[in-house]
Image (spheres, rainbow, N blue to C red):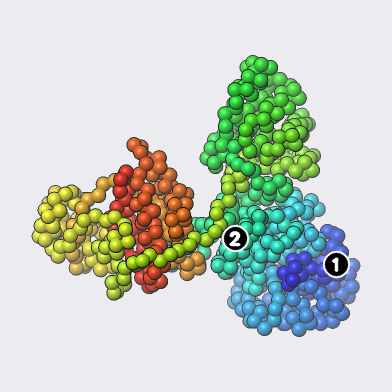
Amino acid sequence: MLLDRLLRPQSIAVVGASPRSFIGSVALRNCLELGYTGSLIPVAQNHSEVAGLPGVPSLSAIDKTPDLAVVQVRTDRILPIVQEGLEAGVRGFVIPGAGYTDSGADALAVSDGLAALRREYEFEVVGPNCMGVLDLVTRAAPYVGTVTSDVRRGTVAVVAQSGAIIEAFVNAGGRVPLSTAVSSGSEAVTGLADYLDFFTEDAHTASVLAFIETLTDATRTLTAARRLSEAGKTLAVCIVGHSDTATEGVTAHSGKLAAGARLTTAAFRQAGALIADDLDELMAFGELLGAGRGRPRGRRTHVVTNSGGEGNLIADIADSVGLQLPLMSSAAVKALRERWPFLGVRNPLDPWGADDYTNIYPTAIHHAAQEPGDILLVAMDQHRASGPHERELGLALAQYLHDTDSAQGKFPVLLSPVSDEIDPVLVEYCRKAAIPLMRGARPGLSALAKLATGVQDVAESTWQRPLVVPDLPPGGTVTEDQALGILASMGVTTPRRLHADNPTEAATAARALSTPIVLKGIAPNITHKTERGLVAISPVDVEQAAAEMIAKNPDLNLNFLVVEQIRGELEVIVGYKRDRVFGPTIVVGVGGVWTEFHNDAAVHVGPVDEKAAARLLDESTVGNMMDAARGGALYRPGVLTALRAVSDLALAHPTILSIDINPLIVGRDHATAVDAVIERA
């Protein structure tokens, strides 16, 4: 109920209202211009009237307690005004000011003060440091930016901490039809999790777009995202920046690969969200979802264009984002060539120039619609500044698409390959026909492909502790030999290896293994040996190689490990990181000495069971490399065993901060861990 009064207020008081400034009157004027029918109350000590509305001197002087108070006063006055409002019964506040940039430490004091009041009173706050709320359900606009006349009501909610991002949607010419837009600001009291919970239950909202910079409560937010998905509503998020965890000083590669935006992205994807790569793609999600057609059944797409070059561009991008472009059937080829013998019948199909467009395009679009598939996309280069003939063509193509779609039931899309403003007549036609109108080939096609891909199973992984989990040796970091021994006891394949205290013993050990070997210099807390010249592969003279390692590292008390040399096709990293925001995270990626250079890893938030481990490997670059390896697929079971092992080991020992198996050398019949590190708190 409190969030309903916050986002859908029936009465609004504006504290600090003034006719002399934009900020002082804009929220009132927005409400009036949008046709808000609730009660509007300017609160101003020095003005008896603002925006044509009679004012009152204070919140406590209002006869009937308002649902919401907009507190647009100096930073040092915010908390006393909120306190006054709470005592008067107000339970919802929008606080545009108190940003750190303009107020410094005073802004932090406001956030701390609001949190303290929240422990005493039950209330909700949009902000501080925000633009406010624009709700097109009630037409309430406690919002301190300009609301343009072409903003339109729909079923897409938008939440962003950044006010500029909300302004981008509000001022986008109605491209995304909105239910409610929330500029959440610093989220001192009310955060993204609360808004997602509200929209999950809200009958006026079918999908949510979120622009995420930081998470104030990751666990609650991901739970709310999962509930939204389970309710059949689509969440699309654009994640920027890095979480607080990105600066953790872990030494393992796993900590660097599972940090910041990558980790947040993995968590939201597992919660059922679609991931937008940038703001243009987030806007494209809004255009697709706002049309009210739900989601395409699949990715099979037939494209009709008015340009061969644009068709080739679309084909390239479609391939890169995962849209499928099936070949045209022989029946379609025959039917079209009987009438136009020189027409190249392919997908994308470019009929331009073969006949008058009024003759050929309706037929071409009809045949494309008849093909087995899920999406019917018509691409046309039509702009607001186009000539009358081009605008006429664009409108005609939209009409042909609508007529055909009405009969065939495919998901229709009209795409302008260039991100440019489109003729308002065409925009209005597409709105009425419920045809998504996309601007820009890559953001449009990428969003379409993601929307057409089945939602990931949002059920959380189950974890059962194995019957035997080995104890850890005393001390801090567990390095190679001990770490490999622990992992071997959990089913991970490891190479044969022998210890040596000096170069002479190393040479003796190499002869005892009677196989190609790798010589490694080992010392306490040295986890990355290659950088210090402590790895020698197949040395001709083992004793000399060991002596050279000692000479290069006089600061270390070196011992040696003589290891059976393992050959394979691919070096993989399998790792674990205990993140202080998200908890257990599992990593699989390109391994070896190139791990940080490639910076390519798939991340799973939470422990992995067999199903989750398989899905993580399927989604990773190394999983695709293993499947596509020349000469046959590489050994998958060994990688899955390693993923389960690091997950189970870390879950059984909460003091573990990170685990690195790097590299796990994968061949056609084995996956062998040749180096490992376990870091503890």
Q: Is residue 164 above or below residue 64?
A: above
Q: Mark 1 vs mark 2: which is more N-terminal?
A: 1
Q: Could you tell me which residue is drawn at 13 percent across and 50 percent down?
A: 514
Q: Where is residue 260 in the image (x, y as percent from the top left)?
A: 49, 61
Which of 406/350 is in front?
406
Q: Is mark 2 on a helix, strand or loop?
A: helix
* Residue 138 in view: yes
Q: Could you tell me which residue is drawn at 63 percent across and 73 percent down?
A: 188
On the picture, is 389 further left or further right than 333?
Answer: right
Quadrant in which the N terminus is drawn: bottom right
Q: Where is residue 63 in the image (x, y as percent from the top left)?
A: 87, 79
Q: Position of residue 282 (x, y in %)?
A: 63, 51
Which of 658/45 is in front?
658
Which labelled disc corresponds to residue 12?
A: none
Rounded to the nearest angstrom, the CA distance separating label 1 from label 2 is 34 Å
In this view, the mark in front (1 or 2): 2
On the picture, is 571 further left or further right than 500?
Answer: right
**Mark 1 and 2 residues: CB-CB less than 8 Å, in contact?**
no
Residue type, mark 2 in image: Arg
Quadrant in which the C terminus is drawn: bottom left
Q: How many neighbours does mark 1 have within 10 angstroms: few (below 14), some (14-19), or many (20 or more)? A: some
Residue type, mark 1 in image: Gly
Q: What element carries label 1?
A: loop
Q: Could you tell me which residue is drawn at 17 percent across and 62 percent down?
A: 499
Read off the residue under disc 1.
38
Q: Where is residue 531 in the image (x, y as percent from the top left)?
A: 28, 57
Read off the residue under disc 2.
226
Which of 368/277 is in front?
368
